[in-house]
Amino acid sequence: MKNYQLWGFNFLTTNRDKETNIITGTKEESEHDFYVFCFDGISFIGVNNKFYIAKYPKMRKLNDYYKGKVCDYCGYYPQSGEYGVVMGALGIIIECSEQAFIQSMKDYAPSMKMSDVRKMLSYNDWKR
């Protein structure tokens, strides 16, 4: 099992603004998937020169209620390592500073292969 999952989204909102898509900056879905590296309980999103951290329950903490919410979101119950659907269904996305984003990423990057860290930094034309 991997320690993360690359998952594509076309609509993501913050906890403060549930209507505006942070990918497009509008209320519309993106035409293309925006890929996010999802870990067990946390994801990092860098888009449009803004930084976000998403938190959600870890796989081992998913009770029947949370599993039902994930099933409502994607149509099936999450399996081990399917962090993307858990993030999509249960994630709370909060904007943060670039420093907090980078520090949080450093805390999780050791569980990734270096080639995947490079992918994470280059996906979606994300710029530091």
Image (cartoon, rainbow, N blue to C red):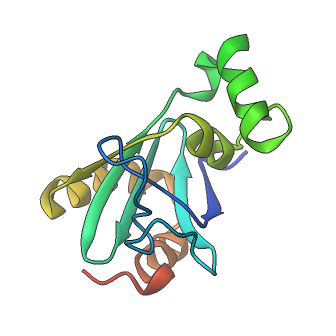
Going by the image, does 104 lie left or right of 74?
left
Q: Residue at x 51, y 78 (%)?
A: 119
Where is residue 70 shown, x and y percent of the image? 71, 33
Residue furthest top in the image: 64
Going by the image, does 57 lie left or right of 105?
right
Looking at the image, residue 41 lies above or below residue 4: above
Which of the 4 image quadrants contains residue 118? bottom left
Looking at the image, residue 126 lies above or below residue 86: below
Quadrant placement of the N terminus: top right
Looking at the image, residue 99 lies above or below residue 78: below
Q: Is residue 67 visible?
A: yes
Q: Residue at x 30, y 84 (%)?
A: 127
Which of the 4 image quadrants contains residue 55? top left
Quadrant placement of the C terminus: bottom left
Q: Nearer the viewer, residue 69 or 57?
A: 69
Going by the image, does 109 lie left or right of 91?
left
Which of the 4 image quadrants contains residue 86? top right
Where is residue 5 shown, x and y percent of the image? 64, 55
Residue furthest right in the image: 76
Looking at the image, residue 49 lies above or below residue 56: below
Where is residue 80 shown, x and y percent of the image? 75, 35
Q: Is residue 80 visible?
A: no
Q: Residue at x 17, y 63 (%)?
A: 98
Going by the image, does 2 lie left or right of 47?
right
Q: Nearer the viewer, residue 80 or 51?
A: 51
Q: Residue at x 39, y 61 (%)?
A: 45
